[in-house]
Structures are given as structure tokens and as C-alpha cells.
Amino acid sequence: MDKMKKKSWIKQSKIQGDWRFDLINGLILLVLTLIFFYPMYLVFISAISSPSEVFAGRVLLLPTGSNYEGFKRVMENEALWRGYANTAVYTTIGTLINLVLTMTGAFVLSRKTFALRKPLNWMVLVTMFFGGGMIPTYLLVKDLKLLNTIGALVLPGAISTWNLIITRTFLTTSIPDELQDAAHIDGCNNIGFFIRIVLPNSTAIIAVIGLFYAVGHWLSYWNAMLYITKEEMYPLQLVLRDILLKAEVAMQSARTGENIENATAVVELLRISESVKYIVVVAGTLPLLIIFPFVEKHFVKGVMIGSVKG
């Protein structure tokens, strides 16, 4: 009887311990979530709040007023919409090229029957640590006549070595050589095996690396600064950078009194320029926030590749 009571007490204490652990763990995660989420939330409420309140630093938890004038100024900028269209095209084309080259390259490098598998794997690995540098890359792009073309933005980084290695590891562990041998016995060649079997069973890794590539293209501006000189070809991030620079110049001019006669206009320009920064950040990140929930399921599954399973 005493033993039964002791076992019952131990079981109950374990349950209580688990309950306390879950509570503490949940509180810690809640606090961390709020800490990480608050900067993004602050940017959003600052974008829709009154420029006067934002400029005064009174927007902390809830939006105050409205920012119709700031949104109007940004949305009336034709370069912004052109930048959206350009970035959508660059991201779509670039991501497709990335996925095609990464998946095909990883498939070849994952097959043990491929004679050059080991030397090519070492060559790929070397590129993670050594690169040509900015000037040689620029000269190469120039010699290939790619300046002011889409190719200058999507071809230099067509394959990410890290993504290639991750994809190769996934295909090595998920698509065994025995499956390929069985397909060959049934009369399926390598191309048919890749299209009919490998791709349908690789949706998780395709979603992961596709998201990585798409985010990289969407947020990229450095290559455009180097290789694009035509303003009509500017991607969104470069357009947003120009808007921020113009807003900063306007603020500096207002502070020094250059080209400003009315003191009220000075203060208003400072306020609107400050709020424009937040609007621009929201404009650049909102599409990614909208797309992410649709690929989250595959993304969570894909990032577990290589984890310990048991």
C-alpha cells in the first residue's frame, strides 16, 4: 500500500513538474517573441501614425492619428511601382534559374555512380571559402556584355554553394541509389528518374531553398548598384534606397534652412521625411510577410533536414 502511494506521489510530482516547466518555458518564449516582434510592430504602427506623433517619439504601443500625406507621397512615386514590377520579374526569373541549377547539380553530385562526384564536390566546397572578388566579377560581367541586363542580376549568383550542399545531402539520404537502379530496370533513364521521382519527392527542400533564393533576390540591391545604371531597370530595394536618401537630403536642407523660407514648412518636411522611412520599410517587407505563411509548412519540414531523428 505504501509503495502504491509512493508511486502515485512520484507520478503526480512528475506531472506537476512538467506543468511548471511548460509554464515557465511558455513564459520565456512569450517574452522572447514579444522582444523580437516589437521592432517590426513599431515600424508598422509608425508607418500608419501621424508624422507629428512619430517625430515627437510618442508612438510606442498603439498607432496615433493617420499618415495619409506620407503614404500619398510614397504611393505617387512612379519609380516605386516600377521597382516593384522589376523586382518581381528579377525574383521570379532568378529563383527559377537558381532552383533548376541547384536541383540538377545536387542530383548529379548525390549519385555515387557518378565518376567525377568526389572531385566536383571538393571544387564546390572550395567556392565557399574563396571568391574572385568584386572587381574581377565586375570585369567578367562587363566582358560578357551583361551590364544593364537581367543577366547581371540573376547569373553571377545562380548557385549558392550552401544551398547546393544542403540539397545534395537531402537527395543522398532521401533518394537511395537502389531506387534509381530499380527505375533503370523499368526502362527509365536519368532524366526521367529526375523529373518523375526526384522532383516530386523533393518538395520540402525545393520550398526551403526556393524561399532562401527568393528572399535574397527580393532584398538584393548591391548587384544592381554595380551593374545597373538605367533608372528604369532599378529593383525595388534600390528605389527605396533613393527615396530614403532624398528624404535624408530634405531633412538636412530643412535643418540648415536651405531652399526653405517658411519655418512651418521646415517642421512639416522633417516630420514627413521621418515617417517616409517607416513606410518604405513596410513597402519592402510586406510582400515577403504575405508569401511566407503559404510556404511555412514545407519550410519547417525542410529545415529539419540533417537533424537527429529517433
Image (cartoon, grey):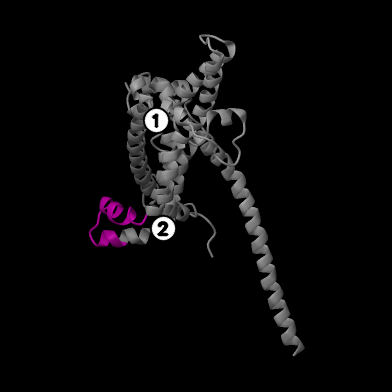
In the displayed structure, would residue 152 be above or below residue 38? above
Residue at (37%, 32%) from the top-left corner? 84
The quadrant the N terminus occupies is bottom right
Magenta span: predominant SS is helix
Horizontal and vertical percent position of residue 263: 56, 14
| Residue at the bottom extreme, as displayed | 1
Q: Is mark 2 on a helix, strand or loop?
A: helix
Residue 273: x percent and y percent?
Answer: 51, 23
Q: In which quarter of the image is residue 36?
A: top right
29 w.r.t. 105: above or below: below
Residue 43 higher or lower than 73, as above or below: below
Residue sitting at the far left:
187
Over which residues does the magenta segment extend?
A: 182-202
Q: Nearer the viewer, residue 30 or 214?
A: 30
> Pointer 2: what residue?
174
> How many callouts does the rendering have?
2
Q: Residue 156 carries which label?
A: 1
Q: Residue furthest right?
A: 2
